[in-house]
């Protein structure tokens, strides 16, 4: 019962559409009508600038942190922590408040692994940073980083619950990037501009 409650709360927190809410509230912009039409940090960065993009990134990352925290505080088991994080990602990607649509789960997933596997987080984030810096493709960095998580979780010997989470989250994030993968293969994926605002 405690684990189910933690998952429900994590899903509800994950469902909060930070990009949509703060885009409208602070900048009077509906991110769904601009750029990639996504409510996540990358589209916020492209549409509103670095500051707003960073704010949305942090807020979405905190969803993952809070999801794991719910699992730890309410149920107190590794499985509950993993499920709390997973439901936060699901909430972000399939938001209750957006007719079960949403973002791609990268920032929220990073928040989850930051709570569960700090060394993996550092390596994954640095890998993402290098790829984005060299190629200007945020999507490519996100796809590679997501695929790297289960490999690193296995390498560092984390429990099977964490490894299972890593695999599921990686699949979810990569599937959510399928349109980006098509554009990358076609050579017409959007690049992020280094000096944008």
Image (cartoon, rainbow, N blue to C red):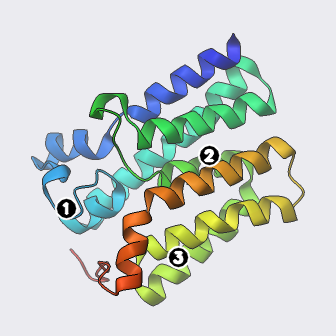
Up/down of 165 relative to 15, above or below: below
Quadrant where the C terminus sits is bottom left
Q: Give whichever of 67, 35 is nearer the camera.
A: 35
Looking at marks 1 and 2 on the same chain, the residue that comes earlier in the sequence is marked by 1
Cα separation between marks 3 and 2: 18 Å
125 sits left or right of 39 in the view: right
Number of numbered callouts drawn: 3
Q: Residues within 10 Å of mark 3 (few under 14, many from 20)?
A: some
Callout 2 secondary element: helix
Q: Position of residue 75 (x, y in %)?
A: 74, 19
Q: Residue at coordinates 77% horizontally, 66% vertically from top-left?
A: 151
Callout 1 secondary element: helix
Q: Residue at coordinates 80% horizontally, 41% vertically from top-left?
A: 161
Picture disc at residue 10:
none
Looking at marks 3 and 1 on the same chain, the residue that comes earlier in the sequence is marked by 1
Up/down of 76 relative to 41, above or below: above
Q: Quadrant of residue 98?
A: top left
34 sits left or right of 158 in the view: left
Looking at marks 3 and 2 on the same chain, the residue that comes earlier in the sequence is marked by 2
Q: Give whichever of 197, 80 is nearer the camera.
A: 80
Q: Which residue is mark 2?
A: 112
Q: Residue at coordinates 28% horizontally, 81% vertically from top-left?
A: 193
Q: Residue at coordinates 28% horizontally, 47% vertically from top-left?
A: 19
Q: Position of residue 95 (x, y in %)?
A: 37, 34
Q: Residues within 10 Å of mark 2 (few under 14, many from 20)?
A: many
Quadrant where the N terminus sits is top right
The answer to whether marks 3 and 1 mark residues whose Cβ atoms lie closer than 8 Å is no
Q: Position of residue 159 (x, y in %)?
A: 87, 46
Picture disc at residue 48:
1
Q: Which residue is mark 3?
A: 129
Cα separation between marks 1 and 2: 26 Å
The answer to whether marks 1 and 2 mark residues whose Cβ atoms lie closer than 8 Å is no
């Amino acid at each position: 019962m405690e684990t189910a409650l933690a998952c429900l709360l994590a899903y509800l927190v994950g469902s909060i559409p930070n990009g949509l809410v703060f885009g409208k509230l602070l900048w009077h912009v509906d991110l769904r009508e601009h750029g990639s039409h996504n409510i996540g940090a990358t589209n916020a960065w492209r549409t509103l600038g670095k500051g707003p993009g960073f704010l949305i990134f942090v807020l979405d990352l905190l969803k993952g942190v809070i999801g794991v925290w719910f699992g730890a505080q309410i149920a107190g088991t590794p499985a509950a922590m993993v499920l709390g994080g997973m439901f936060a990602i699901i909430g972000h990607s399939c938001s209750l408040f957006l007719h079960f649509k949403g973002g791609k789960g990268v920032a929220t997933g990073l928040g989850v692994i930051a709570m569960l596997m700090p060394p993996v987080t550092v390596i994954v984030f640095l890998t993402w940073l290098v790829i984005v810096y060299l190629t200007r493709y945020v999507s490519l960095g996100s796809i590679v980083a997501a695929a790297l998580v289960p490999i690193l979780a296995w390498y560092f010997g984390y429990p099977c619950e964490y490894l299972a989470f890593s695999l599921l989250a990686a699949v979810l994030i990569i599937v959510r990037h399928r349109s980006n993968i098509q554009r990358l293969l076609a050579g017409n994926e959007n690049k992020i501009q280094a000096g944008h605002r």
